[in-house]
Amino acid sequence: MTHGNDVDGLASAAIIMHRYNVPARNVFFLDYSDRRLEFASGKIINAARPGDSLIITDIGINRQQAERFSVLIKGVKGVGGRVLWFDHHAWNEKAVRGIATLCDIAVVGDTHFCASEITAKELGIHSRQEDRLVMVAHCIDRHITENNQRSINRIDRIYGLGLLNYNLKGVAAANASLRKVVSELSRYRILHQIIKREAGKMARINAKRIAVMLSELYAFGGNMCIGFSKTVLPSQACYSIMRRAGSSIGIYVNTEEGRGHIWSESIDILRLASALGGGGHSNAAGFLIDMRKYNWLRRKSDRQRLVKRIETAATRML
Ligand SMILES: [Mn+2]
């Protein structure tokens, strides 16, 4: 099980598949939504046999999902399986006590590394190709572009667009589509045709949606700007908003998933995300939106209400 929305999540899956000959059908992708976790857990608990190992990578734990994860872990261990968890997100004490201690091995919460670095290190996976993939994932995850800038940008883009499939489809189809991507990746064919083709399809949808989003922006506070769109690449959405508005903070609201993404290169936006009930890193964070309260953001007045709420939180926090 790994994070389907993140390059280091996919890279973690790829190096594990390569090393242990894991078939693609045994890989499941999550994104902190309950239906994806439910889908994966159901299949995994059914298939678990004595001696099997469930490896979870790049998934942090949040309060709502703690119970579901503990059922999953106990289910796998109950039939004589093992559970290993490798993650770099910050875990709170309660999550460590409640969930990490249920696992056979859990290495979590070291935010200096990306998840695939931790996975490679803990499982002793090292070769020239694996190191390269892990390095690329690390740079993309940390937004480091000084070295290998061109190839990293290219991979990030192609790759990220391929990932959009995940958000655009239902759970089963999304898993199938991402499995194609990680299978190619696990053979270290990073720029293989399949990934390019998947990415090409998404690139067109992505570009169209971002253009529509930029036609209705909400700027406030002198340095912040918000845009609304169906699923697009969050980083690209936020940067497009910042560039268009000349703001140092870009907020993209995903109107399908009810999720806000906040990005900034110069301002620590983690406090703003926390004030809105979310979390993340100091340069990239997010929060969930109760879409019922905002009438699914259908009308302009609904969107204005959400902007007002974010603005109020921002004046208090930043
Ligand atoms: Mn990650």
Image (cartoon, rainbow, N blue to C red):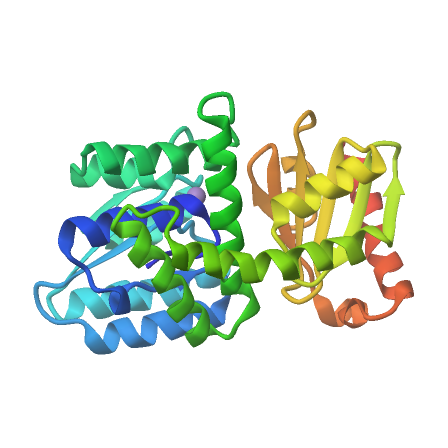
What residue do we see at 77% from left, 54% from top? 211
| In this rendering, position of residue 77 left or right of residue 243 | left
The answer to whether residue 3 of the structure is visible from this angle is no
Q: Which of 104/153 is in front?
A: 153
Q: Which of the pair 106/171 is nearer the observer? A: 171
Classify 267 as above or below 279. Answer: above
Q: Is residue 279 above or below residue 99?
A: above
Q: Residue drawn 48% across and 54% down?
A: 5
Is 152 placed left or right of 28 in the picture? Answer: right
- Please say whether residue 167 is visible from this viewpoint: yes
* Residue sitting at the far left: 51
Of residue 46 and residue 184, the one placed in the foreground of this image is: 184
**117 vs 63, nearest the viewer:** 117
- Whereabouts is ligand 1, in terms of quadrant? top left
Q: Position of residue 145 (x, y in %)?
A: 51, 26
From the top left corner, tell me how far across and down residue 289 is, in percent.
Answer: 69, 60
Q: Quadrant of the N terminus?
A: bottom left
